[in-house]
Each structure stands twice: as structure tokens, then as C-alpha cells.
Image (cartoon, coloured by chain):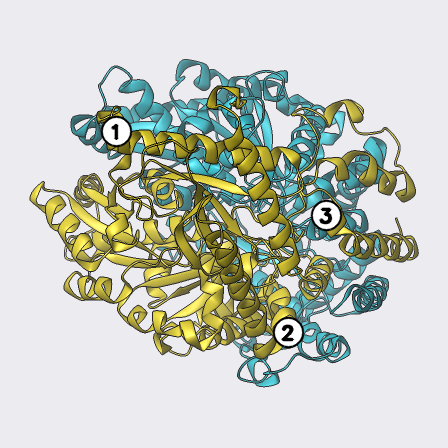
Chain colours: A yellow, B cyan
Amino acid sequence: MDSSQFRQAAHSAIDEIAQYYDTIAERPVLPNVAPGYLRPLLPDGPPEEGEEWTEIQADIDRVIMPGITHWQSPKYMAFYPCNSSFPAMLGDMYSGAFNAAAFNWICSPAVTELETVVMDWIAKLVGLPDCYLSKGEGGGIIQGTASEVVVTAIVAARERIIRRRLADMPEGEEKLDRMAEMRGKLVALGSEHAHSATQKGAIIAGTRFRTVPAPEETGFRVTGAALRKTIEELRVKGLEPFYFTATLGSTAHCAVDDLEGIAEVAKENPDVWIHVDAAYAGSALVCPEYQHFCKPMEHYDSFNFNLHKWLLVNFDCSAFFIKRRRDLIDTYSIAPSFLRNEFTDKGLVTDYRDWQIPLGRRFRSLKVWFVLRSYGVNGLRAFIRNHVSLGEYFEGLIRSRPDLFTVVTKAAFALTTFHVNPRPGSPVSTSANAPNPAHEAYLNDFTNSAEAEYRASANEITKHVYETINAQREFFLTSAVTGGIYIIRVVSATPNAEEKYLKQLFELLVKTAEEGLAVPSADIPTRK
Amino acid sequence: MDSSQFRQAAHSAIDEIAQYYDTIAERPVLPNVAPGYLRPLLPDGPPEEGEEWTEIQADIDRVIMPGITHWQSPKYMAFYPCNSSFPAMLGDMYSGAFNAAAFNWICSPAVTELETVVMDWIAKLVGLPDCYLSKGEGGGIIQGTASEVVVTAIVAARERIIRRRLADMPEGEEKLDRMAEMRGKLVALGSEHAHSATQKGAIIAGTRFRTVPAPEETGFRVTGAALRKTIEELRVKGLEPFYFTATLGSTAHCAVDDLEGIAEVAKENPDVWIHVDAAYAGSALVCPEYQHFCKPMEHYDSFNFNLHKWLLVNFDCSAFFIKRRRDLIDTYSIAPSFLRNEFTDKGLVTDYRDWQIPLGRRFRSLKVWFVLRSYGVNGLRAFIRNHVSLGEYFEGLIRSRPDLFTVVTKAAFALTTFHVNPRPGSPVSTSANAPNPAHEAYLNDFTNSAEAEYRASANEITKHVYETINAQREFFLTSAVTGGIYIIRVVSATPNAEEKYLKQLFELLVKTAEEGLAVPSADIPTRK
């Protein structure tokens, strides 16, 4: 394909992409394919001779489109959003054109330098304390995903505590033995509602992992007291807590840990690395009304949020801020001769490869820069506030039918969670409006109690409603089970989200719940 | 930006990108900027109100282009290439349009299923043994970079040996203690010429790391005997080697380890995970004349190469093949309730998130599919063979001036390494054409010897020539120091590489070397 063929092919692709966005709301959000649908549509291997672009492009519609889940649809309300935007796509186009494995400054100075500048822009935009700016000892880096960031932080935290404790030991076998012994005692911590990335990160780092309780009484939040208690209990057992993920917007409920209380624990325990994972909700910090959450972070070690979730930068783009960049570099820096150059050696430039696990890097700051400039600060704030309002609107709809639905957690960062009430005749819950974190044990231990019967019945009908709606493919929702309670999560935060789609969903929820409640439990089909 | 503004902006961006490629050979490959050039060109933060695309696009030329290293230039001959192609860019455009954090099958079935199919295509194309195909117990996954793959393999290897050894122990604190103790004894291995990714991977995994000797006598290759000896020596010390990176194309010389000999060691040591890192040279396996390297891999555990280096797929795209996918899943799988769905639970679909460190995934198989189809098998083979021929052509040029240059390693996978001969009057090297791996020690220990004097003089002038050429920014080369020898590496393997550029470089090398040799050593400016 030469450059004039590329012009033609790319113009045609752009038109198809624009057309796709123009019609996305009309498509069922979930695809209608069974596992294995794609292989029979393709030959067994690549063609011997090259094919024309027109043949290839035609296969987008034939092979790919039927298997796409439309994350940009306004009817996508599952997980958390993964929003794209046209300016970000333009950024990725240029990034692809300047294609490079930009592992150090000389590999393309613009890649490193634009990243440092836009990360400082972001830090100021969300109101992070100054210690996270590049002008001092900190700074920001773009990594792929929050899960990658969490591993990066856990491993750096593991090595930091070992370096500090063994600073006086001479290098050698004896020190390696002592380091190994120390690693064996380390424990990484996260809320019981933290994203599974922390647990997986601990596996990768080869350390132990424990959860910190975050019961319903505290709004599913880890308090400073709970964290302190867990740390003390572990120390009594001879173990060494070295890392904690504080959550700003938990996966199931979008709960925010007690960041101020945790800051006190951080001050008391300088060797425990505190990382704030704000993967989804962090984007809301562009609005001043949320920035009070950032104040305590001056006592923490690192912070990240995914611009690819709620801030219109195409996947992947997780902004990772670190208070002392040396905490990363001391773990991740290796400088073999082929990577050495005068600029790095003189310490004049940032080599982001030493702040991360992989070596090579893409030019991701371009898309961030384009988005920040295209929307402007006010545009981004309006974008977030619109979704927050939509969340409140939806919570209101759910509350308008207390006969059918119970709100479990009220609208937070555009997410509402609720369950369907059990069929008439079920016992009245003693805590119908206040789910109890002990429910799971309750269900197991007291299966004859009224409370357990209520919960079992509610869970059954909620699951039925959830599965029925997803099976229709018109809307895509997610469920979760926390504390024994089966909940439906609704978060409508795609760029083209509107009240009318939430209204449509609400009507479908009412209809599905009413129909489900009208038939005997035994007639409800179960999906596995 | 609405979809019609996007059409207009994107068409304009495409034209600019096509124009960039049409003129790339005329640009100096290295940028003429000093560290810190970019920040003064930008404001201190994002604008309050959004800007028009025309303003943003104009800044590509003003802010970005001056700081770009042109990796796609035919005068880029540094590191290894990172080749882009127009079909791959089209793939990334659609991937951006279908933007999703595709962490499991239901998140977009096409993302998972196309990846499985094209990875099978690649496995067949490069002649991997059938055990790496998805139809059995193996399969392929796209990860970002070779360094990410190597960490993924090391951590999985670490957990595999522990699982095997402690299979009979009941879960609990005692097992956790025993696991920690075992991890403390583990040693990851790589050639002394292996990419630093293995050493960094061992740091991340929290294990020890040792190199296996690969001296010049064996062509900088690790032999089966050397690996066996290292394993045995470590066991005598009570340590447990659990992982080895075999290199197919080392960073400095593009040397290939003794893959058949290593296969014998693999058979004797089933608990030592053998991974083949073919990051750059692996692309040559599309040509049948190189596929004999793949045969021994049936005895190995995993293999990867970077399609983003030499196979025209834009960065990033590392193809990682695994013989027993359970070896990854048993380490990386965590299934919290919000990630569960009927398809995964039934085992009908592949959840690639369980084969990797991060959770989310991009739709990278699209660009691979487009490249394979646009070039066809024959097109890709012709592409590789052209570069291999260019390498031989360049080696011939260097050999045509034995008065000035000495080939250190002959053209291998398009890479030639050489040094400049010392100034007249220097002692004659006893091993001028056969560099000695003991040189570094030699230089340190016998600084008065003739050999050391020869080497010091050759290193000085070679460094001078290398730095002078890069400082002119017309060509971009890399140097390396191995075994005390300062070498210049030349690899011309970008899509528009041609003999004429190698001829130009050669003439510049001759001129620079002659000028450098004509002046006294003291007059050569040293760069730091």
C-alpha cells in the first residue's frame, strides 16, 4: 500500500468510523454471537499474495461488526465506561505515524517531554498536591491500565522497604538471603471492596495479600481505624504490611475510602506505601467540588486514575502520579550499554522506562493533549457534571417505585446500585433499606430465618431481571454480589448518554420486574 | 468535535501523515533539540475553553515535529527497527473506533476471537511446533513488548515450580511460609548477552538473577553445556534455577543461542521454564530458510517475537506463544463476581486477561490481520529477504576497507557490527579479527600490554566516529561495548531501506574515520 492508496483507504475508513458513531445508538449494545462464531468466517491462514484494501475493509462488516460490544453506545451502562473521543482518535493517528519504541529521550524527545508537560497539566487540573508535579521530586507517567499501575507500585513498595531496612548491609549473597527472607514476610493490603488488581498484583510481586474490612456500616469504606487495626494484627503475627491500595470509587459501589483517616495511618507508618486507586472516579476530580479528596494525598506515595474510563481519552491511558520518583527508579532502572546516552547519563532527561515494567513506550500523551485542548477545562467539567446529574436522575426513577426496587447505594459518580424487591408474600426484611454485610454468613447459617428468606427471594428475582435485560441485548448492565446481596449496577456515562435512555431502561426494568414477580418462582428460567 | 468535524479533521490529518511519509527520507533522522525544548512552547495548563482543531493541528508542526526521531526513515539504522505500515495504521484506527477495555469475551467477542485466530496464523507462518496452537493445550496472545512478555513468563515460571513442589501441602499459613522460603532460593537465568529485560524481570519477580556465559569463542551464544554447567553450579550452592531466557537474536550482535543443545537441557530439567526471546530476529522465521530454529522449541515452554519490530505491525505488538496455557492461567487468573459471566464460567471462551499482568486489553489483532492480508505470505518473505540482502551488502562495503574497519560480527538478520581500526603506529592486535571476551579484564589488568593499547586506541576512534556521525543527525546508529570492545551496530531494515542509503553511510564512515585518524588522538573532541 503506497501513500496515495493509504490516503484513499484511510479516507474511506474515516467515513465508515464517523458513520458508525452516527448510528451507534440504534444498534443493540450487545452482539448476537455464540462463542466460536468468528473462526469459521476466516480461512486457515494468511493469503499467499497480498489483498486489496477494499476486500479487507469489507470484512469489517462481515466478520468484526457482528462480534462488537458497543462500549460507546448510550445504552452501554455496564462495568464502568471506556469512553472514546474524536480528538483522542486523532492523537492516536499521529502517534501511529510517528511509530517508535520510545524507551528513552533520544528515541523521540517529543514523546518524553510532552508526557511530562501534560501530566503536570493533569495534576493541576485535578488538584493534586504540588508534591506530584515534575518540578520537585515527583511526577506523572502514562501507563496502560490501573492494574498495571498497581503492580508497578506494589513491586516498588516491596523493594523500597527492603532497601530501607537493609541499607547498611554490604552487597553479596548474605544480603540476597536476607532480602529473600524479608520478602517472605511482606503483606500487601487492600479494601475487601478494592479491585482484584491488588490481589493479582500481590501474586505477581510474590507477597502475601490481606483484605481490610469495609462493611456496610461505614458505607463500604475502609476507615483509618480499620487499616490501623489490620496492620497491627499482622505485625503481632510477625508479618510486615508494606503496601495498601486506598480506593477512590470502588468497583461494585463507587465507595471512597476514608482518605483523611488513612492519611493519619500513613504518617504513623512511613514504610507502608499508600497508593490511591481512583481508576474510574478520579476523572470527577476535574470538578472543584470533588477536589477535597486530593488534600490528604500529600501524605500518600502515589495515585492513579484512568483517563480512558471517564475522561474521553481512548484506551489505554492510566495517569500514574508518584511523590518521589526515585521510589520507582531505584527499583526499575537498569542501564546496559546499548541504552546509555549522553542525555540520560547527565540526568538531564526523564527516562520513563525506569518508572515502569516494560521497556518500550507509545506516544500516548498526544491523545491526552488533544482531548484537554479540544474540550478545555470547562468542557470537561460540564461533561462530568452531566453524568453525575444523570445518575441522580436514575436514582430518582428507582426510588419512585419503592414497591419494586430498593436502592443499595445512592448515585455516586453516576453509579447507582439497587436490587429488585422479593415477590409479595415474602417476609419483610429487617434491613431492606440497609443491606447488612453479614448477609452472606446469615444466608449460610440461618437458612430458615425470615431475613435469609427475604434475601434469597430478592436475589433470585434481581438476578432474573438482570439476566433477562442483558439477554435482550438492547442495554448492557452489570451485576455484583456483595455481602450476600445480588445487586444491579447502572452507570450511564458514555459521551452520548441522555435521560431518555435511562428512562427507557427504567421502563424495561419495571416491566421485567413486574412480569417476573407475576409468575411463580419455579417458572423463572435460570441461566447459568 | 462532532462527527462531521471529525471527518474533516481526520481527512486533514491523514493527508499530513501521508505527506510526512512521502518526505521522510529528506529529513535529518535525529532531531535538533536540547533537553527541555518543549515546555517553553506550551502554556502552563490546559485552556479554559476548548480550541478548534486547526489550532491544535498547527502545533504538530510547531511543537512536536522538531522533537521527533524519525524511526521510519531509511537513514534510521539504530537499535532495531520499529516498523510501521499503512495497513497497521488502518487497523489501529478501527481499534480506536471500537474502543473498549476488552478484558473478557463478552466485552467484545471479536477482540478475543480474532486474536486467537491470527495468533494461530502467525504460529503456522513462522513454523512453530503444533503445541503452540490454540487447538491443543497452548496458544498465542498479543502483549505489548518483549520485556512485558519476559516478566509474564518469569512470574508464571516462579509460581509453577512452587505449585509443583508444594502440590501436596494443604492451603494455609504454613504453606505460605514454605512458598516464601522457596521463592527466596529461585534463580532466573539469561545469556550474558540477553536483553536486560530478563534481569529486570527477575527484579520484578523478586528472584535472583545470574548470567550464563556466552563468549566470543561460541559466537556470543549460550550453549547447552554452558547452561547445564550454570544450573549445576547453582544447585550445588543450594539455589534453584527455575527459568532461562534463550535468545534468538541478541541485542548487541543478533547472536542465536544453541537452541538444540538447550533443548536437551530442557528435557533434563522439566521444572526450568525455557522461554525463547526472538524479539527482533523472530520476524525472519516467516522465511522457511530460518524455520529450523523452531524445531527445538517443542521442548521449550514459551516463545515471543515483536511484530512491531520487523514485521510491519505498528508498536506495540509482541506475539507470545505458550505451550501449556494453564501455566499462565494458574498464576494470573482471579475471578471476582463482577468479572464472572456465563461464557467464562462454562469454559467456552478464552479470557486473555488470565494470560497477562494487566486486566484491560486493546484490539491489537486488527492491525496484525490487516498486515498479514495486505502483504500476504510472499510479500512478508520478500520484505525480510530484502533487508537480509542489504545487511550482506553493507558487510561487503565494510570489508572492502580492511585498512579502516574490522567486522566484529558478520551480517546476521540484517545487522552488522564492526569497529574502526586504531591509528597507524598502534600495536598490531593479536586478535584484531577475533575479539576476545576477556578484553575488558585485560584492559583493566594489563594496561601496558600491546593488546590493551590496540584496544584502547580502536575504542577511542570508534567512539569518535560513532559520535561524530550521530551528532550530524543525518543517520542514526547505535554503539555497544561488549567484552571490552566498542562496536558500531548498523541495521538497515525500515520499510524504505535501500542500498543507496547504506552506500551514503559507508562513505560518511570512511570520511569520518579518515579524518579522525589523520589528527592526533588528543585533538579528538570527547563527548560525554
Q: Above or below — where is A381 with respect to B134?
A: below
What kind of element bears circle 1? loop
Q: Position of residue A216 (x, y in %)?
A: 28, 49
Circle nearer the viewer, 2 or 1? 2
Disc 1: which residue? B239
**Nearer the observer, A138 or B379:** A138
Q: Can residue B194 be seen in this view?
A: no
User: In 3D space, how far apart are the residues under numbered discs 2 and 3 (Cα atoms)?
Assistant: 58 Å
Circle nearer the viewer, 1 or 3? 1
Q: Which residue is drawn at 86% across and 63% down?
A: B22
Give the number of the disc on residue A375: 2
Label 3 amino acid? Arg
Disc 3: which residue? B399
Q: Above or below — where is A257 with respect to A487?
A: below
What kind of element bears circle 2? helix
User: In 3D space, how far apart are the residues under numbered discs 2 and 1 (Cα atoms)?
Assistant: 57 Å
Q: Which chain carries label 2?
A: A
Q: Which residue is drawn at 50% across and 21% down?
A: B324
> Same subunit under labels 2 and 1?
no
Label 2 amino acid? Tyr
Q: Where is residue A473 in the image (x, y as percent from the top left)?
A: 66, 38
